[in-house]
Amino acid sequence: MEPLYSDSFYFLGLIVLMPLLGAIINGLFGAKLPRNLVNWVACGAMALSFAFALVSLQALVNQGNGEEVGHLSYTAFQWIFSGSLNAEIAFLFDPLSAVLVLIITGVGLLIHIYSTGYMAEDPSKWRYFAYLNLFVFAMLLLALGKNMLVTFIGWEGVGMASYLLIGFWYSDADKAAAGQKAFIVNRVGDFFFLLGMFILYFTVGTWDYLELEALATNTATAALLLPVALPVGVLIFLGCTGKSAQIPLYVWLPDAMAGPTPVSALIHAATMVTAGVFLLSRINWIFTLDPNLMAIVAVVGSLTALMAATIAIVQTDIKKVLAYSTVSQLGFMFMAVGVGSFTAAVFHLMTHAFFKALLFLAAGSVIHGMHHEQDMRKMGGLKKYMPWTHAAFLIGTLAIAGVPFFAGFYSKDFILWSALSNVHVLNVVGVLETAQMEMFTTTLAPAVVAAEGHALEVLGGALFINWFVFIVGVLTAGLTAFYMFRAYFMTFHGECRADEETKSHIHESPSAMLVALLVLSFLSVVGGYIGWPHFIAAVFPKGLKYYALGLEHWLAEVFVVSDTYRVIGRFGEHPYLAEGLAAATSVIIAGVGIGLAYLMYVKRTDLPGVIHARVTKLHYVLSNKYFVDEGYFAAFVRPTLLIGKVMTWFDKNIISGLLVGGAAFMTQNLGRILRNLQSGNVQRYATYISLALALVVLAIFYPGCLA
Amino acid sequence: MTMQLLSTLNTLAMLTPPQGAEFAAIVPGMIVTLVALAFILIDVFHRKGTPRDYLAYFSVIGLGVGAASSWYLWDGTLEAPTFFGMLYLDRFALFFSALACVSGALAILCSPAVLRSHRMDRGEYYLLVLFSVVGMIFMAASADLLSLFIAFEIMSIPIYVLAGFLREDSRSAEASMKYFVLGAFSAALMLYGIALIYGATGTTNLEMIAQNLYYLEGGEGQHAGFGLAMLGVLLIFSGFAFKVAAVPFHIWTPDVYTGSPTPVVGFMATAVKAIAFAGLLRVFVVAFPLDVLRGGFFGYGWIDIAFALAAFSMVLGNVVALLQNNVKRMLAYSSIAHAGYLLLGFTAANAHPRFFLHNDAILFYLVAYTFGTIGSFAVLSYFSRRGESVETFEDLGQLGIKYPMMGLVMGISIFSAAGIPPTAGFLGKFYIFRSAIDVGMQTDEFSFIGLAILGVLSSVAGVYYYLKVLIYMYMKPEKRAFRPLEHTGPKVAMVVCAVMTLYLGIFPARAIEITQESIIDFQGVSSAVQATLDLGQQALEARQAAE
Amino acid sequence: MSWEPTLAHYLILSAAIFSIGMIGVMVRRNAIILFMSIELMLNAVNLTFIAFSRYRIDMDGHIFAFFVMAVAAAEAAVALAIVLHVFRHKRSVNVDEMQQLQY
């Protein structure tokens, strides 16, 4: 449909501009401003940005015609204009970016408010808020970009802001190093992203999302895009594994916890790390072109989810648990993307933003109350000291564990059900003959691939992957419930294990922090009510039915193409029984996880030690240096222990040690050898130049001598 | 046939005495020369014991006028070389003369306080910078190996002296000595190459060299002459590679950068490199476009040499920079890496005549690099008081916190050097890599894509040591206190650099247009390249009409 | 049957002188001799120019040679100044004693 405001909806520019202004004011004059004014500038910028986002949403809904809402766009200016390469700074506001922008500005505002309490005593608070606003600015660029280049600028910008914020507390060398590690790992990802972008550009000649979508969804032009879909998709996905902390580039996220906790909540839980999921959703029409691409995403997502969950079980640092849990939940989102349920991915992105921000902020409140103690082994029994924080953390834990009526349940259930029900339409050639044919003719992939006769192969592979994703998902859901409740019980129940000194100082956090917790708690409960499972939505009264599936309706027009993955119609008939069974499975496994955690950390607190002791003997040979230190390590059943250990070892030795360390080692030594050429003797230099020249001359005149 | 026609035209041009219009070709150079001469006169009347700041500002204004004259000449360029085939008056030359003037002006702005603190507040310093700029202006415009060589030496000799200008600093003396020995050595090699080219073709005029080589290739039994020409090409290339500091001809760079006065290093790292690239483009594009000499994708010609040098420079520059402890030395290696990126752009754009327009990426990169680099050297100049100058990374501790402005400028410069948006450096790298990948995709020569990947990967490694500067400036404890050299000059330079770096990163449209106009107006090219340029001209006009 | 030097002879001679100059730069430690070696290289180039110029009956080479001489004179002036400068600090003009700047 025709947009009402063609390319001139300047509110989009204002959404982006506000945080930038905040960052500039605080960054340049913050040191001289009164401390309270710094808070007001930062939070005011966010509030205005949020208000403009709401205005834009209103305008978007208003221009809708009941079926579709279309999009709003705004071109700020022509950035590069050079014949072979044109790019403009332009913003696009459609149902998808609306969701993300509201999360960024809304949750961002809450976290800014929370930060005023958390950072109240920090001497360079102005710098912190300037960085935070800068981050929001970059993130909004990423979310609102109308073409891939703007997204990429935001993509790099969030990396830079995240670097500045992780290393904010520079007193500690480790923290500075963590920031650096995050930045460099991200740059590796960015490089792949950039490469993918270039290939895309030189194939189709545009980076504009709307033009690309038109190309990819048109049978005639999509043939152009089809051959590069796999390389472009893989490269961009690699970029996403960097930003969104997936295998193999997830290593930076746990280290990034060195930053202030509100930063972890905003950047490393709610917004930046979900950029990858957002980007894949944004270009879903490229990913759905190639089923293999989707399979890669699904498998990587599943493996990351499971691996991170097993590692989370053995962590004792409360923020590390949350960090690995974030990696795991992001894996869930990529699982959803991989099985073609982009709606589920965005849904989980949203609920996760609520409950993970809540968990981080609650954890921050605990850390604040305990004077920067993060070790759960020194916590316990905090329920009576910090009732509000306890309630908030409990709600967050219930939400992430997938307990019904809390937000996490709805999105996680949607993902699991999608894994089971979504099959790439290619493998149901028979179905195509029926009425659904019409729906699919708008998309290209079936026609091309079916013509090549690969239909059956795809079928076998895809089915396997769907079951794999589902089983891994259910397993991970159980582990999630277990380790989150383990963290909850260890922190808030039992005896307080802190020393007397600390104990006397434990206090509830200031009201600025509690307000944010309250709002996020509310959202963590009701945030899921716009995406009920279909078998429940069916029993809703007529008027409410639409809103019970609200998110799916809202995003339907963005993900038209991903319909190729649907065997089952979108809003029509559903196999309610199967869907109900899937939901029941995930609820039961969550219950098992919670029960196990309760048994081991509340009822029989000796149990972890007992298991640990038995497994010590069994795995004495296998385990070496990590074994003794990790007291809680043995607190699972044997196979999980093994996987967890292998994963931890893999993380520490192979990824961090061999790849990162090895690369550093090699470059350092290479550098050392090369540096020795620089002896300082000018005659030797002259000799090098002559030799180099001789080599060049030889190479040109006798090319054979080099071979 | 076209060649024949060109030859006649050229000979005519060479035999006609200079017309009135031709004198425009020497206007920028003349302005700077006159400023330098006026400078000598004023310096004679300088009252002893008073600061020479006003002389510095005088030279800056003079250089500003020189840069502005490019602007006035922009629409009055000539197609034929002027002064008996010695100088071109095209936008390419004007672009580089403006760049040299700006770079010289910024370097001069950083200097007065540094010189005074080293008790070397002498007028000669500014004079040498001015004369060096004169050499640069003529080098970018030269149409003959003779004018090129003279301009080359006018540019180089003052810088040898400038490198050793701090008389009381033994490291400055050593830097000067090393730079001179190796510079003169490589100049002699290059000169030998020129002699061989002259021997093979019987001329030193660039366009006529191209023609004669063309006939030489067509003739029979002339292969000996051709080998001579090839050797000459390599020797000339080595001379330019030395000036741009490309591996393995980079060997002087770290030592000289470490020892020389900081503002001079800023000048050396930017203007000399930029002008060397201008000369490289001019000589190789105009005089040696023959496929046999050019090679490409390992046909072993100068493109392949540039290719190898680009790869080595990017890797070595970035890897060795990781280990440096001295900031100036780190910047020296980083400038080697930048030379690598520029050579990558050079290789890609000149591998085939039809990609010639991609040279605008080099020009843009040079502008971005000039402002970014002088910005960081201006900050270092600000802290280079005699005996307590900031040298190692440890010395940077907390400077960003104590001097927010310097921290900000350094941050912007560093982000630009590392290629992070929204700075100009990002766009420059982006542009270079884009042109390499574009050429690779269009010709199916994946070597370019491979080189681009190598470039991007090594720039990822580069981020590490660039960030180290910021980490020390903001996150490490202070080792010792430094008294900065309070002076307006460096501050002005810093603000200009930082603002330009951000401006070019955010609103690059005009700058890109200027670089394109410069490339499109490039004179003296072969007919194949000229066809590309005509296409570019049409596209540009169409776009400007559309606006 | 008188023997006459041809172009090749001049070229070989100048190449030999050039090489001697190059080797001189690489092996002689005394800075003054080092600079003299560079002068030798420049003069070898001059010889090449003149030889080619004669061979082609063309004056360009001669002109070039004159300019090279002028440049060589300028370089020599600067070179001696630099040597003096170094001598003031080191009390020696041996280039291998200048290794303050390395690695």
Image: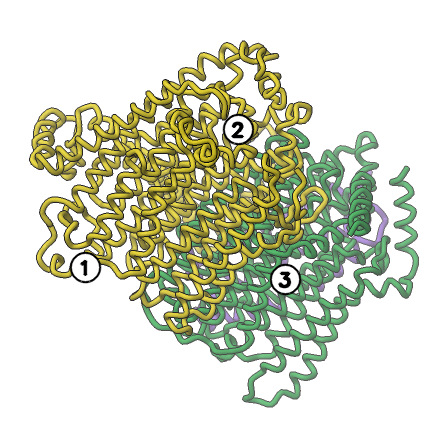
Chain colours: A yellow, B green, C purple
Image coords of residue A70 (percent x, y): 61, 39
Subunit bearing disc 2: A
Sequence-wise, the earlier of marks 1 and 2 is 2
Quarter assignment of residue A591: top left
Name the image quarter holding the N terminus of chain B: top right
Closer to the camera in the image, B66 or B478? B478
Whether labels 2 and 3 belong to a single chain: the reply is no
Residue A146 seen from this side: yes
- Residue A374's disc is none
Please state which amino acid type lies under the numbered disc 1: His
Rounded to the nearest angstrom, the CA distance separating label 2 from label 3 is: 56 Å
Front tag of 3 and 1: 1
Image coords of residue A691 (percent x, y): 54, 43
Question: Which residue is under mark 3?
Answer: B156
Please state which amino acid type lies under the numbered disc 3: Ser
Image coords of residue B445 (percent x, y): 63, 30
| Marks 1,2: beta carbons within 8 A | no
Quarter assignment of residue B153: bottom right
Residue drawn where x is 46% and y is 58% of the image: A47
**Disc 3 secondary structure class:** helix
Crowding near the residue tagged with mark 2, few <14, some 14–19, many ≥20 C-alpha atoms within 10 Å: many
Question: Which residue is under mark 1?
Answer: A507
Question: Which residue is under mark 2?
Answer: A287
